[in-house]
Image: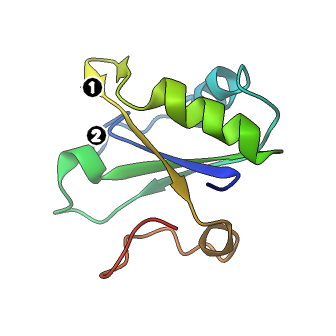
Amino acid sequence: PSRVVMLTNMVGAGEVDAQLRGETMSECGKYGNVTDCTVFELPPGTPDDQAVRIFVVFDRTEEAMKAVIDLDGRFFGGRNVKASFFGEDRYFKKQLAPEEDTDEL
């Protein structure tokens, strides 16, 4: 686990709007103190369910764990959200795109 949670399939390609970051931070705030949130869109041609990655950073790993447990598999706007942990080193280096070998910690 880490303090960074990656959410995918919340919205599809081209569906990011100005409210998405704020709404995500507000929603995730019920799990703990959110210190950062980044919405990252992948290039065209990426499968729609993986085209937008939303990264949420919590103060503590325990807060991130609560978020992953509650959000993974939850429906948002008719989409089945995938929540997983994301490596803090990669997040803070802004290496947010998928890697060939692994996409997890």
What residue do we see at 36% from left, 32% from top?
Answer: 81
What residue do we see at 48% from left, 56% from top?
Answer: 40
Q: Which residue bears the numbered disc 2?
A: 12
Give the alpha-carbon distance from disc 1 to disc 2, as whole Å.
9 Å
Q: Is residue 33 above or below residue 93?
A: above
Image location (x, y in percent) of residue 69: 52, 30
> Would you say 100 lies left or right of 65 here?
left
- Residue type of the residue flagged with mark 2: Gly
The quadrant in which the N terminus is found is bottom right
Sequence-first tag of 1 and 2: 2
Q: Camera-side residue: 42 or 105?
A: 105
Residue extending farthest bottom:
101
Image location (x, y in percent) of residue 7: 46, 43
> Would you say 27 lies left or right of 63 here?
left
Label 1 SS:
strand
Image location (x, y in percent) of residue 78: 26, 18
Check disc 2: other Cα within 10 Å, few if <14, some if 14-19, many if 20+.
some
Q: Camera-side residue: 20 or 2?
A: 2
What residue do we see at 28% from left, 40% from top?
Answer: 12
- Residue type of the residue flagged with mark 1: Arg
Residue 18 visible in the snapshot:
no
Image location (x, y in percent) of residue 101: 32, 81
Residue 46 visible in the snapshot:
yes
Q: Which residue bears the numbered disc 1?
A: 79
Check disc 1: other Cα within 10 Å, few if <14, some if 14-19, many if 20+.
some
What residue do we see at 38% from left, 22% from top?
Answer: 74
Q: Is residue 70 above or below residue 43?
A: above
Label 2 SS:
loop
Q: Tags 1 and 2 in contact by the CB under 8 Å rule? A: yes
